[in-house]
Image: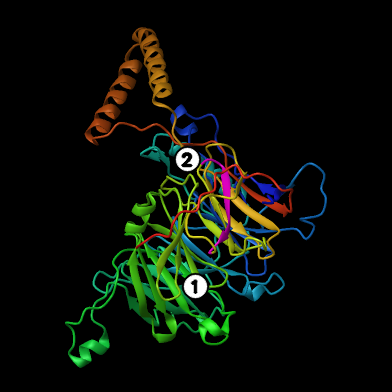
Amino acid sequence: MEKPSLDLVAMSTNPDGLFSSVPRNTTKTSRSSRQTDSFFKSVQWSADGTTLFTSSSSNRINTFVLPSTLLAPHGDSALTLTPQGTLYLPEPTAAIAPCPYFALEQPSTQCILTASTDHPIHLHHAFPQPPPSSSSQSSSLDDDDDNDDDDDDSTFGFPQHKQQQHQQPKPLATFRLIHAETERYLPITSLLWSFPGTHFLAGSTNCLSLFDVSRPDLGLSDTPLLTIKTTGGPSAQQHKSGNVGARVVGMKGTISALAMQPLASHGDYYGGAGPANVVSAGTWTRNLGLYDLHRAGACVATWNVAQAASLAKIGGRGVLQTVWSPCGRYLVVNERESSGLLVYDLRGTHRLLACLRGRDGETNQRLSCDVFPGTNEEVGGFEVWAGTRDGKVVVWEGVGMREGSVEPSYDFEVGTRGSAVGGTAMHMSGSVLATCSGSWKFPDDDSESSSSESESESESDSGSDDIESGSSSNESDSEEDGMGTSQQQRGRARPPPAVVEETSLKVWSITAGNTVQSSHREEVNEPYET
C-alpha cells in the first residue's frame, strides 16, 4: 500500500479575518482579559478550485484566494494566507453555501449564501468592500471595551464575541422562511446550492424549502417555490382523492445535512446521462431520506441509522453530514460523537455496506469528511478523508469494494494533538488538501481549584490591609458581596473560561509516497445483515 506524503504549502492562523488587529485594552481586570479567541470551524473549496471559504466561531466568513504559485518551491517555510474578504454575520450560522459556478475571473459569480439564527437567508458578495477606517470607530470600540469591563463576558464558560460595528454592505438578495402562525424566522440548519445554480435548498425542522435564486433582483422570489414536508403527512393529492388515511413514508427531525447526487456518468444505471437530482437529507434524530426534485420532491426512501450504528458499535448522536460517492452509488453518513462512518449501497436495497472504523470522533463538534475517486487501481473504489478530534486526518481506500468493518489505510498529523480537525476538503485535482483545526478547551479542575485558593488567599491578605483604609474598602466589600449574592440567585457558579490552544487553516500538497506498512490492523468482516 502506498502512503502519499503531505507537505504544508500555505497556512493561516487568523480566523477573524480582516480588521482583526483592532487595538484592544490589555490593561483590564483578570476577568475581561481572559476572553478566548475564536477558531476555524469549517472549510470549503470554490467551484473553480481557486478559493477557500472558512467559517469561524466568531461568526465570520473568510474568503482566501490561493496564489497561482501555491505548489511552486518556497523553501522550508509555508506561505501565509491572508483573507481577501470577510463577512461579519449578526448571529451564529450552521450553514454556508458558495456559488456552484464560482469563477475568479467573473465577479458576478462571486457570491455566497449564509443562514444566521433569527435572520433570513442572505446572498452576500464573497469579497465585500472593506469598512472605512476612522479614528472615531477605534475610539468608540475602546470606550465600549471599557464600559464592558464589569459585564459578564462568557456564558457557561464559552466566549460571547462582541461584534464590531463595521459598516457591512447590504446583502445582494434576501430569502425568507417564516412560520405562518408566529411570523418568526425558522432556523436554517443546512443549505444546498448545487449545479446549475438556479435554485437552492434549505433544511429546517420537518421540511425542505426550495428557493429560486436565478433572478433575485426582481424581488419576487424571496419565498419558497416548493415546500417539502418530511414528516410523512398526507399530501395534497391524497386530500383531493380522500385517501388521507394511507400510510406515507416520512421522517421527523431537524434537517442537519443535505447533499446532491453527483452528475450521472453511467447511462446503464441512471437511464441516460444528466443530473440525477436525488437529494439525501439527514436529521439530528438519526434519520435519512432520499428526495427526488424532478418529481416535486417526492420521497424515495427513508430509514434510521441507529440500528446500523449499534450493530457496528461506533456510537452516534445525529447526522451532521451526508456525502455521495463520486459514482453516485454509495452514501457516506457522518454522525457526531461517532467513532466511524457508515457506507450505504443505494442501488435498490439501501443496505449497509461497510463501516469505516478507526476515527476518533466522539465529540459534539462538527468533524467533516470528503471523498475522492480512488487513485489505487489495484484496490479500486473511492477514498474517504475524515478529520479527528486529536489533530489527525484518517484515510480509507477502496471504499465500496469491501464489506463489513474497514480500518483506515493510513493517517496524517495535520494539527496539534488535542486540536479537533473540523474541516477536511479535497481539491478537485486530488493533489491539494485543505484542513482547519481548533476547538475550545477547559482548564482542569485542579488548576482551577488551586487558582481559586490563591485568589482567596490574596483576597484575605489584601483584606487585612484594607481594614486600615477606611470606608472605601467597606464599599468595595459590599459591592463584591452583592455580586456574589446575585450570582447565587442566578442558580449557578461562574464556570471556568474556555480557551483556544491552537487554530489554523492549512493547505497541503499531496505527492505519491513509498510503499509502507499500514499502522492499522485491517479487518474485513462478513456483510452486515440489516
Picture layout, residue 197 above or below residue 411: below
The magenta segment: 390-400
Q: Mark 1 points at which residue?
A: 260
Which callout, 1 or 2, points at the residue further toward the start of the chain?
1
How many marks are shown on the rendered structure?
A: 2
Which residue is at a point 38% across and 21% down the rendered structure image?
A: 449
Which residue type carries mark 2? Trp
Looking at this view, is 505 or 463 the one in front? 505
Judged from the image, the secondary structure of the residue bearing numbered disc 2 is strand
Q: Which of marks 1 and 2 is in front?
A: 1
Q: Position of residue 114 (x, y in %)?
A: 49, 65
Picture layout, residue 360 above or below residue 52: above
Q: Mark 2 points at which residue?
A: 440
Magenta span includes 393? yes
Q: Position of residue 281 (x, y in %)?
A: 40, 68
In-image side of 241 versus 519 (left or right)? left
Which residue type carries mark 1? Met
Q: Where is residue 350 in the image (x, y as percent from the top left)?
A: 40, 70
Picture layout, residue 344 above or below residue 18: below
Looking at this view, is 216 or 500 the one in front? 500
Using the rendered image of the protein, determine whether residue 185 is visible from the camera's viewpoint.
Answer: no
Looking at this view, is 309 or 284 the one in front? 309
